[in-house]
Amino acid sequence: GSTKSAVLLSPDNVLDLFHSVDAFLFDCDGVIWKGDKLIDGVPQTLQFLRSKGKKLVFVTNNSRKSRKQYAKKFLSLGITVHEDEIFSSSFAAAMYLKVNNFPPDKKVYVIGEDGILEELKLAGYTGLGGPEDGKKAVELKENKLFEHDKSVGAVVVGLDQYINYYKLQYGTLCIRENPGCLFIATNRDAVGHMTDSQEWPGAGCMVAAVCGTTQKEPIVVGKPSTFMMQFLLQKFQISPSRMCMVGDRLDTDILFGQNAGCRTLLVLSGCTDQSTLEDASNHIQPEYYTSQISDIYKFLGP
Ligand code: PLP
Ligand code: CA
């Protein structure tokens, strides 16, 4: 991270940032919405940036939905976003397998929700587990072995509301009994806004459970890992120095942007407040900070 203190975005410095970037990468929760509730002034701001020719990209660590499902969520909030402009950690997990030539005849065990299964399917992979296995109970009996599919070559772990002992045993056996099995984490967020009024356990605790049983560390594909950024840069062919990452979390969003050499803007509309930003224990300083993205529109709009 940078040691230089973040600068408050203002009508005086916003133009410099605005003219020096071609694309804005927006984190979703805490920036666009909180849970299912839109943050004030977002549609007008996005519309304004588009009208000025800026490329918009949306990057979320929440793996519960696929890109298609996120496009629907945007639409339900009155914002038109194309699937191709969305990078979710569920999509990143599928793309990681694709980029690394994971063989389609091998299966993927999912401790996670529908979004991951849908992205795997779209990428041509067979996913097992998911919400379905949330209904399964284990039988702990002498001489009864827990069965698992030996053709599983990767375990993907993301947020899972339906995590249980069955899935933990399944994923653990896949990884422990097959030394070549990949262990992929969509993200390691401690908490997330499952509802707009409260934070809930995030994927970090599901990932930690599997780290605990396997004594292995996962490949993380979500923010702050550079995987999604590399993929995104290749796709859009924009220089990182001409992109601005806008997020509400220092150790995922801002780090993600800084790791790639992007400009960074922290918004205080999500999980970080000004005192956290200014606290001596914080070593991640964005270039700019502001209360919410609609400030960009407020400073530059009509
Ligand atoms: N993971 C979960 C389960 C969440 O609920 C959230 C936010 O709602 C996130 C991760 C973080 O998402 P984002 O990267 O869009 O802030
Ligand atoms: Ca966020």
Image (cartoon, helix red, strand yellow):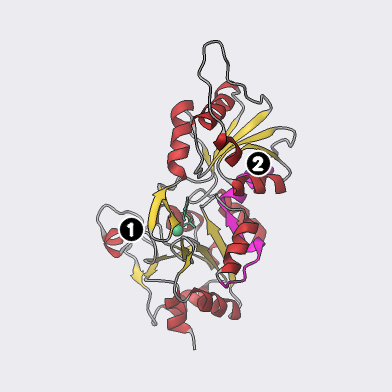
Residue farthest toward the left in the current orientation of the protein: 280
- Does 25 sit above or below residue 104? below
Badge 2 local density, few (<14 within 10 Å), some, or many (20+)?
some
The numbered disc on residue 3 is: 1
Q: Earlier in the sequence, mark 2 or mark 1?
A: 1
Q: Main secondary structure of the magenta part?
A: helix
The numbered disc on residue 97 is: 2
What amino acid is labelled 1 in the image? Thr
Give percent across and percent down for residue 52. Answer: 58, 80
Mark 2 or mark 1, whichever is nearer to me: 2
Residue 1 in sight: no
Q: CA distance from mark 2 to mark 1?
A: 36 Å
Find residue 267 and report its image quarter.
bottom left
Residue 88, magenta (yes or no):
yes
Q: Residue at x 47, y 80 (%)?
A: 297
- Does 165 sit above or below residue 224? above
> What's the magenta region?
78-99
Give percent across and percent down for residue 178. Answer: 61, 23
Which quadrant: the N terminus?
Answer: bottom left
What amino acid is labelled 2 in the image? Leu
- Does 104 sit above or below residue 281? above
Q: Is residue 260 left or right of residue 267?
A: right
Find residue 70 and report its image quarter.
bottom right
